[in-house]
């Protein structure tokens, strides 16, 4: 574990070293699109409360995912 932390620290000072893990940006956009579409469909069907709750909850989850928590 300490070795991994040291590599992460080294990478901050050497911008030429590529990241080992992909950023996951494409997955984040896909998850947000599918979730928004599903919640919008729930609102159109008539489940306004459930659709709105889903949009709010998914927004919080995606925000936390994006900031790395």
Image: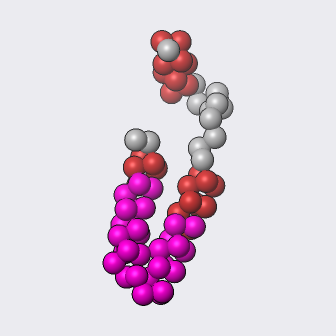
Spot the residue most to the top. Answer: 2
Give the main secondary structure of the magenta stretch: helix
Confirm whether the magenta stretch covers residue 42: yes
State the residue at coordinates (62%, 35%).
Answer: 21
Percent across and percent down for residue 12 are 51, 27
Q: Determine the residue positioned at 37% across, 62% down.
A: 57
Horizontally, residue 56 falls left or right of residue 3, namely left
Q: Is residue 5 above or below residue 61?
A: above
Q: What residue is rendered at 45% in x and 48% in y? A: 65
- Residue 4: percent from the left, percent from the top? 53, 18
Q: Nearer the viewer, residue 65 or 23?
A: 65
> Residue visible at 37% across and 82% down?
48
Q: Nearer the viewer, residue 8 or 40?
A: 40
* Residue 10 visible within the image: no
Q: In the depicted view, which residue is nearer to us: 12 or 34?
A: 34
Task: Report the coloring of the rendering.
Answer: secondary structure
Residue 8 visible, this orientation: yes
For the C terminus, the quadrant is: top left
What are the residue bounds of the magenta stretch?
34-62
* In this view, 54 is above or below 48: above
User: Which of the 4 quarters of the picture holds residue 63?
Assistant: bottom left
Q: Position of residue 68 (x, y in %)?
A: 44, 42
């Amino acid at each position: 574990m300490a070795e991994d932390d040291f590599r992460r620290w080294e990478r901050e000072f050497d911008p030429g070293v590529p990241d080992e893990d992909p950023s996951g940006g494409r997955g984040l956009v896909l998850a947000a699109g599918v979730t928004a579409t599903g919640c919008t469909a729930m609102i159109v069907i008539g489940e306004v409360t459930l659709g709105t709750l889903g949009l709010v909850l998914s927004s919080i989850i995606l925000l936390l995912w994006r900031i790395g928590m």
